[in-house]
Image (cartoon, rainbow, N blue to C red):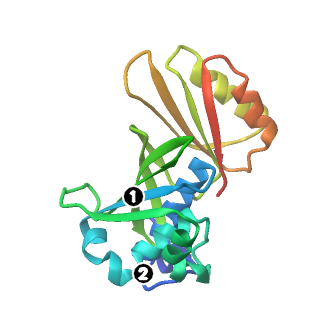
Amino acid sequence: MKYKSVFDIIGPVMIGPSSSHTAGAARIGRIARNLFRREPKWVKISFYGSFAKTYKGHGTDVAIIGGILDYDTFDERIIHSIDQARKKGIRVKFQEEDAVTDHPNTARIQMGDDQGELDLVGISIGGGKVEIIELNGFELKLSGHHPAILVVHDDRFGAIASVSNILAKHKLNIGHMDVSRKEKGKMALMTIEVDQPIDEAVIEEITSLSNITQVTRISD
């Protein structure tokens, strides 16, 4: 892992003892909230590896719930996030998993309400940096540190090019792009991180394309 500055090593302004176990966990939770686009009615968190062994002592549990409540890493409300969630009527459950994962700081967030559910796997890679590696069964790579769009689409010829052309027309430079599909010719997911903020007009234009099912914008 290469760091661009000393701040990438020190980590962000945050609540908690560990950038990996608290700031990273909060960011994973907040990305999940961003993708779900509303407050859930229930949340199940599964911790793996180091997260499973130390999440209570390092505040990983309150951090990840704080993120789901849309608290930033430095928000002092994180300390009481689990109590706040339960006061809001959100059912919260934590589970320690024995399965061996590729990264020791791994968490799975499952949450939902009467309108739908979300299943997300994230890893905290150090210095408060995270990667989302799975979303609703799709493999992906999303850092959450840059403006991004997630485009659910039919796996058809020209779908990727049509989205790329719209981004180019609006002078949005692609920093990272990843495409995942569960089965050839079925549903697929584009994950695109760009260098500039994404206007609503861009989202609407991409949404209007044929073979596009859903477009979700993520702010950095």
Q: Is residue 190 above or below residue 145?
A: above
Residue type pointed to by label 1? Lys
- Secondary element under disc 1, as helix, strand or loop, is strand
Which residue is denoted by mark 1 in the rendering?
A: 44
- Quadrant including the N terminus: bottom left
Residue 148 in the figure: left or right of residue 125: right
Q: Is residue 15 above or below residue 141?
A: below
Q: Is residue 1 visible?
A: no
Judging depth in this view, the residue of 144 and 213 nearest the camera is 213
In primary-sequence order, the first of circles 1 and 2 is 2
The residue that appears at 51% across and 77% down in the rendered structure is: 83
Q: CA distance from mark 1 to mark 2?
A: 22 Å
Which of the two marks, 1 or 2, is nearer to us in this view?
1
Image position, residue 206 (x, y; %):
70, 29
User: Is 26 left or right of 124, judged from the image as shown?
Assistant: right
Front one among 79 and 187: 79
